[in-house]
Amino acid sequence: MKDSSPFADGPGPAAVYFAYRAAAWLAEHTPPRVADRVAAWGGRVAYRRAHGKRRTVERNLARVVGEDPHLDDMVKAAFRSYAEYWLETFRLGRYSHDQLLSMVEPVGDSLAVIDEVIAAGRGGLLITPHLGFYDLGVAWAGAKGWSFTTVAEVLRPKALFDWFAQIREKHGLTVLPARNGRSVRERLADVLDSGGMVALVSDRDLGRRGIWVEFFGERTTFPASPTLLLQRKEVPLVAGSITKQEHGFRLHLERVPYELTGDEQADVSAVAQVTADALEKLIRAAPEQWHLFSTNWPSDEPHLRPRGREAAPQATTPQATATETSEPPQIGEPQG
């Protein structure tokens, strides 16, 4: 087993680990109004100084909103929202169950969507993009008595992964380390077989060997596991997000229909596109809270290795082996 000491990978990763721990301690012990102001300031500083990330966020959001005259304001808001996301993630430990429940307002039939899936006992898959405050959503779900299993990349140092996993597991989320896409899918399939719920952040194909979809009008790859799990297990699919409002947070959950025809290749493509369309809908509702600070389309990645198993849409197969994460950061992201 890999050493989980903060110094296992050298002083650099150890410094990152202690920086995150220090930030979490400050977030939990600083008066909320002060912490809110610090987060807003941090977002402004990042916007001004992270020139490369700013250009990436601008390109990503332009795909969502087109030639919007307020695009730059949305980019600024995205940086602020991402800083606020980290603040809320770091101070989860200070919230009681009652506080968590009072902070979040479910929209429409959102509660019934998950309750019905759980009551059916067949298992279910919840997908979400890097939108809003998904770690707060996990804590809220735990306070509601819901339990999910997810996947996270093993970070450097491993102590950082262990710490993030402990934060999430404290609120009812079981975290599986992502090492081999196929073996992880087997474990997730077991969760579904037992009637459990799986939650995956599904708008980034970190393994770059996923399934081709059209996403905001342009071809790219999506992680394979959500689609392959749905094709194999035919469990209910739910798309959800938790976004910040003027006062508190808003939870949106929606059942997403899909059909399997028995044609394996066609089903893979069709179901992957269904997931992409569902995540598009969520992102369009709050684009300024989409925390996508990395490239996500081949046209923005001439310096990276090609996507897809053979870098061509027609080469996609059901055996694609992408690695999914419910990863932490993207600004200075440790997962690479």
Image (cartoon, rainbow, N blue to C red):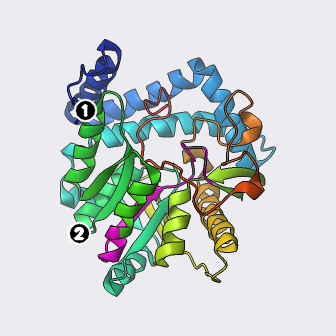
Can residue 293 be seen here? yes
Queried whether the magenta region covers residue 208, the answer comes back as: yes
Q: How far apart are marks 2 and 1 (CA)?
A: 33 Å
* Residue under label 2: 145
Element under disc 1: loop
Residue 50 location in percent, x, y?
A: 58, 21
Among the two numbered marks 2 and 1 on one chain, the one whose residue lies closer to the N terminus: 1
Amino acid of disc 1: Lys
Left or right of residue 13, residue 76 in this image: right
Amino acid of disc 2: Gly
Element under disc 2: loop
* Residue under label 1: 2
Residue extending farthest to the top is: 11
Whether tag 2 and tag 1 are in contact, CB under 8 A, the answer is no
Residue 324 location in percent, x, y?
A: 47, 50
Give the answer, above or below, for where 224 lies relative to 308. below
